[in-house]
Amino acid sequence: MSIDRNLVVQEIARHQSRLRAFVRCLLVRPSDVDDLLQETNAVLWQKADEFDPGTDFWAWASQIARFKVLNQIRTYGRERLVFDLDTLQRLAEVAERKVQDLDKRRDALDHCLTKLPPAQRQLIDLRYTSDHSIEKIAETIGRPEGSIRQTLYRIRMALMACIEGQLATEANS
Amino acid sequence: MNHEQNLERFKTLMSQVVDGGMSASESTELQAIVESNPELLEHMADQLILDSLLAEELGTDSMVALVDLVANSQMEVKSNAAMRIAQVRSSSQSTGWLQQSPIRLHKTAFWFVAASVLAIAAFFVGRWDTSAYANAASIVRAALATHSELIERVYVVDVQRDQPGVPGFTPPRDVHVMTQGDRFWVEMNRGDRSWCWGRDADGATWLTLGPRRAIRIDSEEAGTPLQTISDIYSLNLETLLDNVLRHGEVRYSANAGPTHVISVTPSRQSLGWLREMTIEVDKETKTVRRLVIQRSLNQLGKSTVTFTLVDSRVPDESKYRAEGHLTEPFRVLTRDSTPDKRRELLTGWLGSMADRWMKTKE
């Protein structure tokens, strides 16, 4: 294995979160995300020799990833997609740009999660840590599914606002 | 619909995109809303990126459920809420790839991931040079190749707690795991009950419930905890290393002894339950000789689970299926024969934890 290939492997690994978030933006089913991410990784690996060290890895990788993802999801049935390919192209452009500061967002999220009231944190934990479906959460805590969905939506909105606030504070300091 | 109504409907539909439950007609509806309000794509991306981050930050890795089957199923913690949460967390599963990947990785991707794990660690830890990376990667490759040979490997499982007096906990004894490729079978004993379970060549999980009855759960029916436990008991390095890919730091020790040692330490607070994982690979046979997982169980203290290779032999094919452990006349309950009875039997035999071993009907 050449040194350049090692470098690419390291860079792919370093960008896993970005790639995953990017892929997530284009798929309905979370269960499809990791499969497609693995396939994207494999393509990046195959094309490792094409990467020019010293250039922007994300710019290189995201183009390949976008092509791979969009090409792959052409094979998916309609039930696995939200949008048509034109809209997905536009969404991919937005996602590609937004995930560039993902590391900062992650740090901000860690902080914002500690600020959640216990009841909200419990709901988020049930959803993400315990990986419960909405139906299961509703059954567990005895509330209607619609109410759970709305509450989770509001919590995520609050987290997004908190993250933006954190990023703004950081930028001004 | 006017703009305000569109926005309200967009929120509802986005909730379904993120949390599941979107129908084809709702997808069409969302497409139409976004086409007429292109600025909503920004908002959509924000929400999905946050969802991805939450899944990464809060999702627990598949190894979380490792000791549940052998150690925790008797532990019915009912009075202490914190302990209950610990139990729920320990048997639940994450958004990790295992749960989300019913389709197995292709070999190519598989090798890539295995190699990537080690390379990532080298990069972040900064301890490996190129030759060290290549060395570690080749060890992993060799170990995986050996694992898939038509040789049955026998591991003994030992679970130790640092708080042996925890009420309701009875350390399992004489647990042996027989593995061959992705198949495995285990014989478990607890108190006056003993049973076998395993995964057959079709990927179905089976459990014997006494000498004349068994249940079979097809791979697509298996709930996340069961998939996780099964993957770990097959001692499938693909699974273990993929978890590390996202969260761990890997260290490779070139020692003078008979084994290579790969140690993994979680790098984020969210994986506080996993203290350390160590894989020992035989230098000559490239077999996994030992897997040690040190785990933190919140208020229940720490546990160490050790899988130690004790034998390699020609497999007894019949033992990789439930029928090989039953006495005539017996009955194997399947999806086709008794779909609901199986869940009832599982929870009755192994406790409420087993309820999640089968997916809930959609």
Image: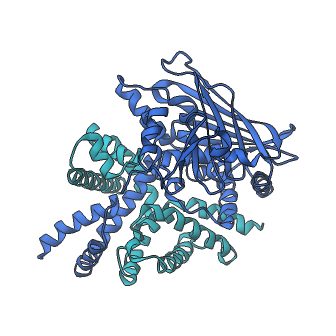
Chain colours: A cyan, B blue
Q: Position of residue B314 (x, y in %)?
A: 82, 46
Q: Left or right: B31 with respect to B309? A: left
The residue that appears at 39% across and 30% down in the rendered structure is B84
Q: Position of residue B240 (x, y in %)?
A: 63, 48
Q: Position of residue A146 (x, y in %)?
A: 21, 54
Q: How many marks?
A: 0
Question: In this view of the protein, which residue sits in the foreground, B320 or A165?
Answer: B320
Which quarter of the image is occupied by the C terminus of chain B? bottom left
Q: Position of residue B182 (x, y in %)?
A: 67, 52
Q: Left or right: B323 with respect to A95? A: right
The residue that appears at 26% across and 50% down in the rendered structure is A155
Residue placed furthest toward the bottom: A86
Residue A123 visible in image: yes
The residue that appears at 26% across and 39% down in the rendered structure is A119
Question: In this view of the protein, which residue sits in the foreground, A53 or B311?
Answer: B311
On the image, which quarter does residue B295 sit in?
top right
Q: Left or right: A121 with respect to B219? A: left
On the image, which quarter does residue B83 sit in?
top left
Q: As displayed, is residue A94 above or below residue B68?
A: below
Q: As displayed, is residue A34 above or below residue A75?
A: above
